[in-house]
Amino acid sequence: MSAPAARPMPPLRRRPEAPPLYAIADLAALGGRPLPEAVAAMAGAGVRWIQLRAKPRPPAPRLDDAELHRLVEACVAAAEGTGAELWLDDRADLAALFEVAGVQLGQRDLPPGAARKVVGEGAWIGRSTHDEEQLAAADADPDVDLIAVGPVFATTGKERPDAVVGLDFVRRARRATAKPLVAIGGIDAGNVAAVLAAGADSAAVLGAACTGDVGASCRSLLAAAGGRP
């Protein structure tokens, strides 16, 4: 009897190269402006990572799955050919259906190992952390490609935000992990340079990226982050 064929090895994921600015296109923060339009403006300004976030928070409507699928599809089309890579907030199932960079998981979302079974080896998985224990777990998890820490400053991006961790936690996180590190929470053009100086590879910006003229806001954030996309 011949030996069973060896199972092919899964493809190796490339390490994320986090850009200094990671903009979050948030449906509620945009105040009714179309999400695909914001994605196009962010990409046109030079932002290279954009997260799509459509949580049911006033004034954003609650979207059913069919509506959210259509919205993601339109955002993917808006980013096509721009060089920007898209991330999805929470939804591993939708990330598996589109050519996106990855999915960002909170502590109440699917565990990274379960999400990996959905998105496969071709997508990155980010994990949001808010304290040392969560950070250590994310660092040890082979399915986590990127770690987010925060909120660094006070934020209105969530209805029930976690406790502010401050820049000191960003510094401790940098010493605790070699994985790409994203800082989030209350970051704007006035403090983004300090966040990057504290050791974050990337600063995730929601409110300051979605306020006013989205393209102009993102260009100001990029300039404050050092001028690099």
Image (tube, rainbow, N blue to C red):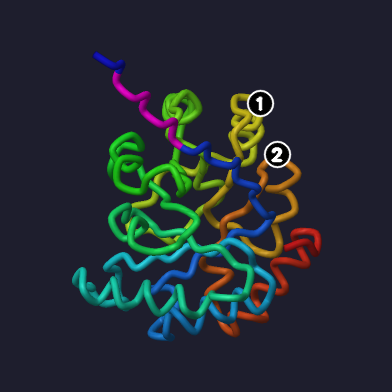
Q: Where is residue 36 in the image (x, y as percent from the top left)?
A: 45, 80
Task: Give the residue drawn at x 30%, y 69%.
Answer: 57
Task: Specify whether 162 is left or right of 83.
Answer: left
The answer to whether residue 125 is above or below residue 222 is above
Which residue, given by chain and number where applicable, does mark 1 sit on? 175
User: In front: 173, or 169?
Assistant: 173
The correct choice, above or below, for 109 with respect to 48 in the image is above
Residue 58 locus on image (x, y percent): 30, 74
Question: What kind of secondary structure does the magenta stretch mostly adopt?
Answer: loop
CB contact under 8 Å: marks 2 and 1:
yes
Q: Does the magenta stretch include residue 197?
A: no
Residue 153 image point, x, y percent: 55, 50
Q: Which residues make up the magenta segment?
A: 4-10
Within 10 Å of disc 2 (Cα), the crowding (few <14, some 14-19, many 20+) is many
Q: Which residue is drawn at 35% across and 40% down?
A: 116
Identify the element where label 2 is drawn: loop
Place residue 99 in its image quadrant: bottom left
Considering only vertical position in the picture, is 105 above or below 53?
above
Cα distance between the residues tagged 2 and 1 = 9 Å
Q: Quick one: label 1, few (<14), some, or many (20+) residues within 10 Å? A: few
Q: Mark 2: which amino acid?
A: Gly
Is residue 47 found left or right of 164 in the rendered image?
A: right
- Amino acid type shown at disc 1: Arg
Name the residue furthest front: 1
Element assignment for label 1: helix
List the residue tagged with mark 2: 199
User: Camera-side residue: 163 or 143?
Assistant: 143
* Residue at figure coordinates x 43%, y 42% from the top left: 121
Earlier sequence position, callout 2 versus callout 1: 1
Residue 9 among magenta residues = yes
| Percent position of residue 74, x then y | 40, 79
